[in-house]
Image (cartoon, rainbow, N blue to C red):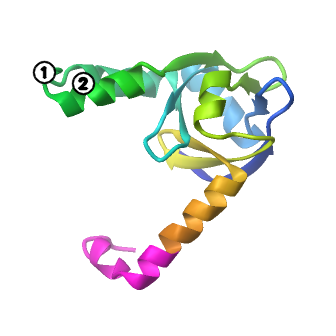
Amino acid sequence: MFRGVNNLNLDAKGRMAIPARYRDRLLESCGGRLIFTIDVDRCLLLYPLTEWEQIEKALMSRPNMNPQVRRLQRLIVGHATDVEIDGQGRVLVPPTLREYAELQKHAVLVGQGNKFELWDEEVWARQRDAWLEDEIAGDPAAALESLSL
């Protein structure tokens, strides 16, 4: 289970260090093999290979004659890129994906249970603030009615 917000930096080659608190789990669960792909919110998704294989199988089992399904398959599976944690605990974020997500030097890695989202730090801050404004203006309680804390 991946959770939390982690600020990190990308080096000049586009590598980022996986936070130490996740490294051992990733090395144990998937041998450090991960998949980057795009998300429609202009961030990147980072899956352990074992989790990605389930997502990919489910997505590719959908009827591809449906234009929306086919579009998602093209975008999500088409942009899926294998990466591996190196000896220093880093992964290389592919240039095409860095460009898509507008990733600069400062980034934010957000745990989302079975995966991570990778955001440019400024884009993340703007998006997070917009979501918070939407929740304050709307009725956040309605979305949580069936949740027990």
Label of residue 65 in the image: 1
Q: How many marks?
A: 2
Compare residues 40 and 88 and report the one nearer the observer: 40
Q: Amino acid at mark 1?
A: Met
**Dot 2, crowdedness within 10 Å: few (<14), some or many (≥20)?**
some
Name the image quarter holding residue 62.
Answer: top left
Name the image quarter holding residue 69.
Answer: top left
Query: Residue 81: image x %, image y %?
Result: 54, 18
**Looking at the rendering, in which quadrant would you find the C terminus?**
bottom left
In this view, 99 is above or below 8: above
Q: Residue at x 56, y 61 (%)?
A: 127
Does the stretch in magenta take in 114? no
Query: Residue 32: image x %, image y %?
Result: 64, 20
Query: Residue 55: image x %, image y %?
Result: 35, 28
Residue wearing tag 2: 70
On the picture, is 138 further left or further right than 100?
left
Residue 54 makes an appearance in the image: no
Say what secondary structure mark 2 lies in: helix
For the residues bearing labels 1 and 2, Cβ distance under 8 angstroms = yes
Q: Residue at x 57, y 48 (%)?
A: 111
- Disc 1 to disc 2, C-alpha distance: 7 Å
In this view, 1 is above or below 80: below
Q: Reading the chain from its start, which is encountered first: label 1 or label 2? A: 1
Compare residues 40 and 4 and report the one nearer the observer: 40
On the picture, is 57 further left or further right than 32?
left
Q: Which residues are magenta?
A: 133-149
Say what secondary structure mark 1 lies in: loop
Name the image quarter holding residue 64.
Answer: top left
Label of residue 92 in the image: none
Q: Amino acid at mark 2?
A: Arg
